[in-house]
Amino acid sequence: MGNTSSMLTQYDIEEVQEHCNHTFSQQEIVSLYQRFCQLDRNGGGFISAEEFLSVPEFAVNPLSQRLLRMLDGLNFKEFVAFLSAFSPRATLQQKVEFIFKVYDSDGNGKVTFSDMLEVLRDLSGQFISEQQREQVLTHVLEEAGYTKNSLLGLSDFMKILGNNGLKMEVEVPVD
Amino acid sequence: MNSNSNEMVKPSSSSSELELDLDRPNLEDYLPSGSSIQEPRGKLRLRDLLDISPTLTEAAGAIIDDSFTRCFKSNSPEPWNWNVYLFPIWCCGVVIRYFILFPVRVLILTIGWIIFLSSYIPVHFLLKGHDKLRKKIERSLVELICSFFVASWTGVVKYHGPRPSIRPKQVFVANHTSMIDFIILEQMTAFAVIMQKHPGWVGLLQSTILESVGCIWFNRSEAKDREIVAKKLRDHVQGAENNPLLIFPEGTCVNNHYTVMFKKGAFELGCTVCPVAIKYNKIFVDAFWNSRKQSFTMHLLQLMTSWAVVCDVWYLEPQNIKPGETAIEFAERVRDIISVRAGLKKVPWDGYLKYSRPSPKHREQKQQSFSESMLRRLEEK
């Protein structure tokens, strides 16, 4: 069978590093490649939603369905790019951008009230009524100087999330 | 073992749903700390609601590395033929293993089968009237053929602790790495085992020969099998003459570095539970049977072309359920004992997740604590 990581040449690794703005070291990319091959059960060169859901720890995550829209069918380069926001080397800007993208489901660069409400629904499920969710969201939005009809852009997210010590790091195991 | 096919089937009644519930320990007890729900303080602000980074971090962490997949990862052997001097030696090894050892082993196994079948068939059909004698001979014959199997991979097995004896109301539970676990244990004592029904030649053996030592077969995906098996189990442990019962409560093969959750079935029979820990030494071959990747025949061939299968078996101190202890707590305690002895790490997952998705309950738990924390903070000023 041989070692799958040997199939990555230095060029490949550098190309991937380029693609993810050098947020991962070469060794980390080799590790991620092994993981990618492990998740890509049928060896198609991309990971399907079904394959992601075979990881129970991921499947039970409240945001898994939402993330799957970004994850379904990623090839290795895109896979690494997706994870790059979680690298300790990623800038705060990159991390906030990532969060913004999770909210911005239609990708138009604006987050609406209903976008935020949807994420909140994923997180809280049936334990809060729809009405209560709307009230809470409206309340905190108004407190922060926005209204129900405000469209939040990336710069707003930077302002809101940029200074509260965002901790969004995952270590890639390297052997 | 009545809970065994739980995950595969939609619970048909509320009682089985309850059982599904009880069968899983509280996941939050196991998950590493620093999970998405910390105890944030203070008044709820917009940034607290929008900051989904803990949940995202958890998701990314699971994508990068997760404890469940690690349980079923076969470890490829460390190559050692990497230089000019070692390579010829390695080649000699290959020649010896494939062209000398392997044919000899096939021969041994064939002889074993000839001896076994030529005595088993007459005994089985001629001694119809003498049940006790017939059972005794059949038992020894099954032990014999298992010894031949172990010899066919030059099994170097060290048994520690007292050899099990036949007595009612006791059940043996062991960690599960491959079907060869069963063969290794069976060569010492003719256990009656509870196992998944297999297709092909293994299935044929199961339904003919192994049935005679009292083995019970079931199908993970059959709901009604579960009840039948549960009943058979209860009947079996009551019989004084029956072979000791062996259960692999993990319900699936794990790579011998981890243990997955124990199914509670074996622990609610009201019997003494005798833990058995099995640890393989991977120096020559990885004994983990990855049933997704290879058939059992291929797995056996792999073992038969290796130098040896080295393993340790520990028969551990029998355990009884403590007053006030639930079957799940008891199962966890026994899992602890086995994991410590065999040096295995425990993970909070049900091995059947290989075949199905986790129940929405786990997600709901996370949602519930998120909601509670949010509402609590909303009231703070």
Image (cartoon, coloured by chain):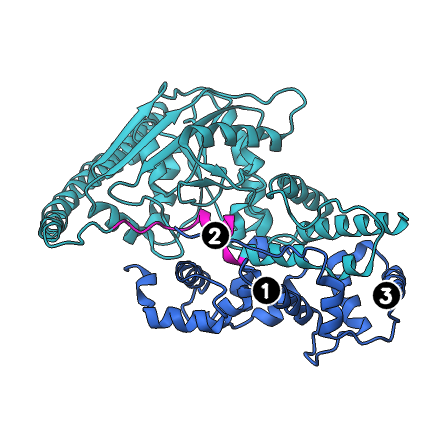
Chain colours: A blue, B cyan
Residue B69 is marked as: 2
- Residue occupied by mark 3: A141
x 64%, y 39%: residue: B29
Instruction: Kindly identify the amino acid type of the residue bearing the numbered disc 3.
Output: Leu
Question: Can residue B221 be seen in this snapshot?
Answer: no
Answer with left or right where residue B356 lies relative to residue A112. Answer: left
Q: Which mark is residue A91?
A: 1
Do discs 1 and 3 share a chain? yes
Q: Is residue B245 above or below residue B207?
A: above
Q: Which residues are magenta?
A: B63-78
Q: Position of residue A175 (x, y in %)?
A: 38, 50
**Is label 2 in a helix, a strand or a loop?**
helix
Task: Let me know if marks 2 and 1 both belong to one chain.
Answer: no
**x and y percent of residue B112 in the render?**
19, 38
Decide whether residue A65 is among the magenta residues. Answer: no
- Callout 1: helix, strand or loop? loop
Q: Residues within 10 Å of mark 3 (few under 14, many from 20)?
A: many
Q: Quadrant of the N terminus of chain B?
A: top right
